[in-house]
Structure formats: structure tokens, C-alpha cells
């Protein structure tokens, strides 16, 4: 039989014991995870007391402050602006695709893209109404009450030809 002296608890092990205790683990669970006895874990925690109640209260206070920040009108306005810009960018991209579909004479693709544009316009309109209801926004005389609605209609081949001829004429005038 060899006599082995127990090794000293390293600083890293002590920090691990304290961290596990802060997370709410029991002495036995900490001992099992660290490979130390419950007596060693208890001695470390006596040397470096951890007030779980104050840590919980502090965590709760931090969570409350974080929640208050999410209700800050300036923060909400910034989020609203980012979402609106994202939707506007998607709508613009869809408008470009619709124009390309019209040029490519792919009626099924055109209709699908037009429906997508309509859905995005509706989402943008709904978002604007929600922001107006929730955020403290001041309306000026220049602000419109609602966004314009996009109307999609199915065009006959003759209508498409006439529209293309009109677009071509407008492009020639612009050039």
C-alpha cells in the first residue's frame, strides 16, 4: 500500500467550484463534477463564501433593466426603422424582379413576383400601423395616414404588348 497525500486544490479548481455553486449545483454535484470530496468543496466554499440569494437578486435586477431597455421608445424606434428598411429593400428587390419578368415575358413568374410584392407591401403597411399605435410618434402634415396599396391585375397579351410598347417609347424618349 502506498501512502498518497491528497493534492492541494488549485486556483482553477477553486474557481470551478465557486462557478458551479453560483450556477446552483449542490455540494455533492460539485464534488462529483470536480473529482473532489464534499469536504473539500465545503472548505473551498467556506473560504470563498458565495451568497446565492444576492447573486439571484442581482441577476433579477439585471434582467429587469434589460427588459426596461427593450421598452425604451428610442430603442423600439431603432428596431422599427431597421425592420422597415429591410422590408423596403425586399420590396425594391421584388419590384426589380417584376420588371425583369415583364421584359422576359414569363407571365407565371411575373404573377408570382407581383403577389410577393403585394404581400410585402401589405406587411409594410401593417408594420407601419402597428408602429403608429405602439410608438409615441408625432405626425406631421407631410405624413400620410396609410401607405399606398399595391393592386395587381391580370393583363391580357394585348395589354402586355401595349405596356411594353409604352415602356419602349418612354425609354427612347429618355435616351
Image (cartoon, helix red, strand yellow):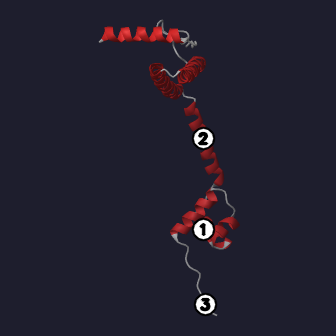
Residue 86 at x, y = what percent? 49, 28
State whether residue 21 appears in this view: yes
Labels 1 and 2: the sequence-earlier one:
1
Disc number placed over residue 63 in the picture, else none:
2
Residue 41 at x, y = what percent? 63, 69
Q: CA distance from mark 1 to mark 3?
A: 24 Å
Residue at image x 59%, y 62%?
A: 18
- Is 64 placed left or right of 105 in the picture? right
Disc number placed over residue 23 in the picture, else none:
none
Local secondary structure at mark 2:
helix
Local secondary structure at mark 1:
helix
Labels 1 and 3: the sequence-earlier one:
3
Q: Are marks 2 and 3 in contact (CB under 8 Å)?
A: no
Indicate whether 131 appears above or below 143: below
Quadrant where the image shows the N terminus: bottom right
Local secondary structure at mark 3:
loop
Residue 119 at x, y = what percent? 58, 21
Residue density around tag 1, few if under 14, some if 14–19, many if 20 or more, within 10 Å: some
Q: CA distance from mark 1 to mark 2?
A: 29 Å
Q: CA distance from mark 2 to mark 3?
A: 51 Å
Residue at image x 67%, y 69%?
A: 32
Disc number placed over residue 44 in the picture, else none:
1
Residue positioned most to the top: 141
Amino acid at each position: 500500500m502506498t501512502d498518497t497525500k491528497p493534492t492541494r486544490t488549485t486556483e482553477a479548481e477553486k474557481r470551478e467550484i465557486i462557478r458551479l455553486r453560483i450556477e446552483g449545483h449542490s455540494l455533492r454535484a460539485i464534488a462529483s463534477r470536480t473529482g473532489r470530496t464534499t469536504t473539500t468543496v465545503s472548505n473551498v466554499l467556506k473560504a470563498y463564501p458565495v451568497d446565492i440569494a444576492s447573486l439571484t437578486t442581482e441577476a433579477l435586477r439585471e434582467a429587469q433593466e434589460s427588459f426596461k431597455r427593450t421598452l425604451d421608445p428610442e430603442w423600439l424606434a431603432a428596431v422599427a426603422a431597421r425592420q422597415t428598411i429591410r422590408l423596403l429593400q425586399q420590396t425594391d428587390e421584388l419590384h426589380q424582379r417584376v420588371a425583369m419578368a415583364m421584359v422576359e415575358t414569363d407571365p407565371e413568374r411575373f404573377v408570382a413576383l407581383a403577389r410577393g410584392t403585394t404581400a410585402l407591401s401589405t406587411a409594410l403597411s401593417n408594420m407601419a400601423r402597428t408602429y403608429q399605435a405602439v410608438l409615441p410618434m408625432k405626425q406631421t402634415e407631410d405624413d400620410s395616414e396609410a401607405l399606398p396599396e399595391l393592386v395587381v391585375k391580370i393583363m391580357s397579351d394585348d395589354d402586355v404588348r401595349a405596356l411594353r410598347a409604352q415602356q419602349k417609347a418612354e425609354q427612347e424618349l429618355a435616351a
